Image (cartoon, rainbow, N blue to C red):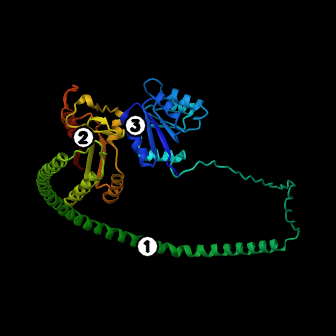
Amino acid sequence: MSNKLALVVDDSRMARHVLSKMLSEQGIDVDSVESGEEALGYLCGKKPSMIFMDHTMPGMDGFQCLRAIKNDPHTAMIPIIMYTSKEGEVYESQARALGAVDVLPKTLKPLMLAKMLERQNLLPHQTSSVPVAQSVGRAANDVVIVDNEPVAEPAAPAVKEDHPELEALENRIEQLTNQLQGMNSQNDARSNRSARYQYLGLGLCIALIGWLLMSNNRLMQEMTMMQTDKRKLEDTLQLQTQQNEDMREQLSSQIDTQVQQSDAHNRRFYESIEWALNEDGQFAWDEKPFNDRLAATLSQLAQNLRSVGFVGEISIRSHLGRFCLLTDSNGEPALPDTEMTLANCEIIQLSPSLAESLGNDQTPGFERFIVAFQSEYGEDIELSLSTAGDRRPVARYPSQDPDVSAQRWNSAASRNQRIEISINPY
């Protein structure tokens, strides 16, 4: 089966190159044109499997070209994806209303492109298929029988008129009452004897109270002595506490001084490592900033930092150079020869969104390295990736005079195309 063919319509040479490279990595052949008019002329002779359309172009814009393609019966069925820096739900709704199947940003990542191609059945191994939805319905009749007939109250037990047990109970109560009256008579006789016992008990209580008072006085004296001893112990403890506090402050001051000295030493150590890494941090004009070589450097750096007990963050920031490039015979961008001038090549002008995308680009090997790094080091050593685009050059570019040597210009761009590493302990 032949590969699928994609047509990229964009007036930016760099944008065409970036998208074409990502499509080629998916196994899709790519043709590209610079305008909507060229795209319509291309479709007269070829019928690609898909079209990636920029919006803002000289002459016919993306929507006008999209409408023309959809109005032609020979090209109306070709899937068209808007590839643009425009954003927002309103724009996406307009694009879909005109016939676009999807909208992709210029900050496109390879994974996002692969998911879109798979969603639209545009990958080389996919074939068009029309899903058939089947629905199965089922009904059930449930019958609930409610009996509203009132339930009769249980009949109250009949009260018997004859109760021989009550009569026997009354007789027993009368017997007990008579016995209590006899006992009261006996208690009156005994009350005289209990009075003598009460006087004896009172005397014993007075003696007990006297003994308790004496014991209380003795306890009070002992408590006074214990309180005196307690105050002495408190004074001794307070003096010891003050001595301990003074010693603690001295030790704390010594430790702080040692920590400051150690931090300053470590900072100089980290700065020397940063300088050595950043001196050799340049990467080629056509190389992704976060690549396999950088992954190997960071892996070795993390191992060395862990060996000295480092806990913190390693910050990696990419910087892009503005190279002067020309297009070779294959339609690919290339560096000019040493004798050429700026008149023979085109200086790359990166939009903020494209600079953000190119500055954060990663190789598959680096992506796998990030996953393995997080699994190995966790929160002890963290990586922070960012890009400054082309906004912070370290080498000054020469003037853009057409007679200036292209090699001189690209030499400055090569120095600015670099990785900057910063070690930040917690």
Rounded to the nearest angstrom, the CA distance separating label 2 from label 3 is 21 Å
| Left or right: 254, with 27 as reference point | left
Residue drawn at x 51%, y 28% as measured from the top left: 65
The residue wearing badge 1 is: 201
> Element at badge 1?
helix
N-terminal label among 1 and 3: 3
Determine contact: label 1, label 2, CB under 8 Å. Answer: no
Where does residue 167 sit, x and y in percent of width and height?
82, 72
Residue drawn at x 36%, y 55% as measured from the top left: 368
Where does residue 382 sit, x and y in percent of width and height?
30, 52
- Regarding residue 81, the answer to whether it shows in the image is yes
N-terminal label among 1 and 2: 1
Q: Amino acid at mark 1?
A: Gly
Rounded to the nearest angstrom, the CA distance separating label 1 from label 2 is 110 Å
Where does residue 415 sit, x and y in percent of width and height?
20, 40
Q: Quadrant of residue 35?
A: top left
